[in-house]
Amino acid sequence: MTNNANVAAGQQKLRSKRGHERRINGTIYTVLVIMSIVWLVPFVFLVLQSFRSYKLEKGGMVDYLIPKTFSLDNYAFLFEGSNFFSWLGQALIVAVAVAAVTAVLIHVCGRLLDKGEGEGRGTRVALLGGSLLIGFVALVGLTMALQGFALAGSWVKALISLALFVLAGWIMARVYLKQDSKLLRSIPGYVVEDKHEGLKKFCAMFAEFGALALIAQCILAPMTMSQYVRWYGNTLTIALFTSVIQTVIVLSVSYALSRLRFKGRKLIMNVVLILGLFPGFLTMITLYFLLKQMGLTQAGAVPGLILIYCASSGMGYYISKGFFDTIPKSLDESARIDGATRFQVFLKIIMPLAKPIVIYTILMAFMAPWGDYVFASYVAFGHQDGYNVAVGLYNWVNTNDFQNYFTRFCAGGVLVAVPITALFLALQKYYVEGVTGGAVKG
Amino acid sequence: MVDLDYLKMSKPQKMLHDLGRFFTGLPGRVGRGFMKLGLNIGRCFKGLWLSVVDLITTFRDGDWKTRLSYLVMGSGSMARGQWGRGLLFFLFQTVFNLYMVNFGMAYLAKLNTLGTVATEKVGRKTVYGDNSFLILLYGVLTLFFVLAFIYTWRMNIKQNKISQQILASGRKLKRTKDDLQSLMDSQFHKTLLALPTLGVFVFTILPIFFMILVAFTNFDYNHQPPAKLFTWVGFENFKTLLSSGSASYGDTFKQVLFWTLVWAFFATFLNYFLGMFVAIMINKKGIKLKKVWRTILVMTIAIPQFVSLLYVSKMFAADGLINTYLMKWHWISQPIPFWTNPGWARFTIILINIWIGIPYLMLIATGILMNIPADLYESARIDGANAVQMYGKITLPYMLFVTGPYLLTSFTGNINNFNVIFLLSQGKPMGLAGNAGHTDLLITWLYRMTVSDTNYKIAAVIGIMVFVVLAVINLVVYNLIPSVKNEEDFQ
């Protein structure tokens, strides 16, 4: 009897405990749902208002949320007077064509090389060089032919595209045609072990050349821009260059301070610590003057801003240094014993391990220029062609005519927010890793 | 006090005790700091003296190559076959000489007055005189250049001495090729740091030095070069900012500083605890869709602040969505003065900052919470601890210990948190002396001083004050939390 009573009491207790648990979870769910609503509501509002036509339903501040008619007028305004879409379509077609031809060409070259396998290394290298050259010429020729030699008259553009093609050749050589004994095996289409690997490599190559051709085409093809498209282009250019240069600088500094021991290391870290305590905007007029001396203000605001963002970026080394600190030192030491120079250790041993922090650094450097108002507006100094999106849209909201421009600001904001948010969410994992590591290691 | 007594105390008592000890120990520590400083200065002078002695002895013992290097930098290296180094030294000297003769000397000479010849209008022509701005900037640059030159010159002589010793002992000198190779190996740090250091020097150190000097001049809207000259005024601007009176900004400064600290406190700690709370909720066992909740919250980090904050600031405006809807539903009859009443504005800013700030802390706390050993909680549960006790005894101490350094950087960051204030309220409502608003932080005030008021001298002083405030906070915290200091502990 007593036994049964005990069991019953135990079950009762368990049930009440479960009920308690359920109640707690219920509360938590309620809180989370409310928070989610609060977190998302402004963005939903933003999107809704961006569909309220600035022509039909005038006024920025109205007393209703859902537009009476959904229209794309605001978005149309952003692209008014720009041939953006036809330009993009052309670029895409060109990029796909270039990528297809090049990829097939290299594939065929790989097959050709296949026949030279039995012969000496010299022949193979010669074949390799020949196929590279063919691929290279094809890439250049095709891009130029397809856009009807739009090159004429712009040396800068010509140089940039040349650099891109060199890059393409380099990537080809490094990634697809490795110089070691696996030379032939690494060529797409040749691979024997895994059927899909060849396909995967082909796809990767296709995507890579497609992207390169797209960039080349974007730079080369003429586009008439509306104000907004120009601001967007400015910001994108700044973000791309900054993310590359800044990452190189930050990684170099943090690697040097984390792994190498030299005289003055502590001194550098202390000086950076002290410099970091000065507010950034203190030096604004001096920076403006320095840039002005170099001709990098107003119309030259884009390179000027890239310079400013990158020049002092070495001071933000903390997080990546914290990451490097966690990689065991024995790795370096064993590589050093095997005869690697410090440069080789950096490039071949540490960098592959540091992928999360590299991506984190790139992501941060890419996202920062989208939100910068202060320096961007000061350097552009009222010169509209030098604005970035933040400055342009801020001015729309803070003009006297802001009632009229408010919905257009919403549309412009949505077009900025969507790609950036998508990028961020895709790379969220790396962001979390960087932020957590940085917070823990200080 | 006996150690045992200390151990018996409760947490708050311990904290009070620590703080008390910190302040009673302060004079001693400051004294020791000064002693250390004195010793360091002494060591500096000793080092200087030693290098002068070294210069003399090197000259006395040196061969003609070394001696020639005293006059023509790099000549010794070149004569010994180290062409790369020698050429670099020589090039540096040539550039320096050309710079000084053609450019630097003129500015350096005027640095003490910042220019005397004013710009005048002769007839319809403007005859430009001195430009104080250029004199100050290039004067500072020249000073740095001279210091760099002296350092390089000294290095050049040291090199000669070493080369001479190596040759005397019968070994071979490094060739240019070896030098280049060592840049990728034993001297790799130089390769890595050369460009970043140059960038930081030109775009951070030089400007900061320049602005610190501007704080001691009367550079403002009435003294704008090239039309007008400005000159040194000593501590005049510090007096203007710090003393109270009709013509000075003392009262404003106090109010702005107070609000800056209050803001930084709330922005840091409110977000910290709320973020931790949210992280604990999401990470609780049995809660589903963890990833979804996290992703939703993270949206405020992902979307550029100028979009989200500008939009939200308009939402809270007098004719914004919130007020219009509340009035439509007849909950209020007057719009709530979110941005026009000082108290409301401050409250709204802190509130909206929670919206922006919680996700960061949630992410950080999530990472750390997962690292807390689960058996700690298990044993606590067996001992009959409830959720609150476990939080107070396990979670919170662990979090505080691990994120101590983060709290410090976060507090520092919030004192300089320009974006939130600027995009939400621009410092409004205005109404303080010195064109400051009730929600202005020191940094936004500084921004307005620079951009719209062109009152550079006061802006420079505010910048220095921000530095002082941050330096004091950092020093105090560094002394209180030992885990901030030790870099190698985490390795």
Image (cartoon, grey):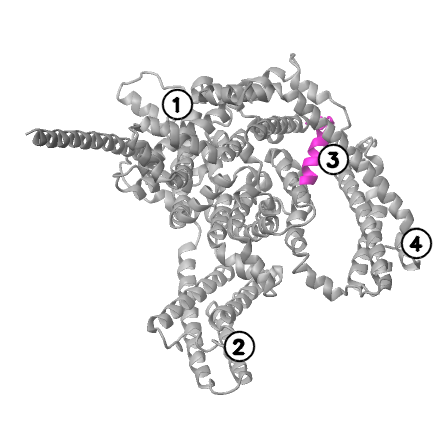
Q: Position of residue B109 (x, y in %)?
A: 85, 37
Q: Chain of mark 4?
A: B
Asked if the residue under mark 3 is in contact with the one under mark 1, i.e. CB atoms within 8 Å, the reply is no
Tell me what residue is drawn at x 53 percent, y 47 percent. A320
Q: Tag 2's secondary structure? A: helix
Q: In the image, B126: left or right of A4?
A: right
Nearer-N-terminus badge (1/3):
3
Nearest the viewer among B25 and A55 is B25
Q: Name the quadrant of the N terminus of chain B.
A: top right
Looking at the picture, do discs 2 and 1 lie on one chain?
no
Residue A134, above or below B310: below
Q: Which residue is mark 2?
A: A133
* 4 vs 2, front mark: 4
Residue A438 placement (x, y as % from top left): 49, 42
Circle 4 sits in a helix, a strand or a loop, which is it?
helix
Residue B441: say if magenta: no
Disc 4 marks which residue?
Answer: B61
Q: Give the residue pinned by disc 1.
A: B318
Residues flagged by tags 3 and 4 on a common chain? yes
Task: Calculate the distance from the C-alpha at mark 3 to the C-alpha at mark 4.
Answer: 47 Å
Q: CA distance from mark 2 to mark 1?
A: 66 Å
> Viewer-nearest of labels 2 and 1?
2
Contact (Cβ within 8 Å) of mark 3 with mark 2: no
Q: Are marks 4 and 1 on the same chain?
A: yes
Dot 3 corresponds to which residue? B133
Q: Is residue A406 left or right of residue B142?
A: left
Q: Nearer the viewer, residue A131 or A141?
A: A131
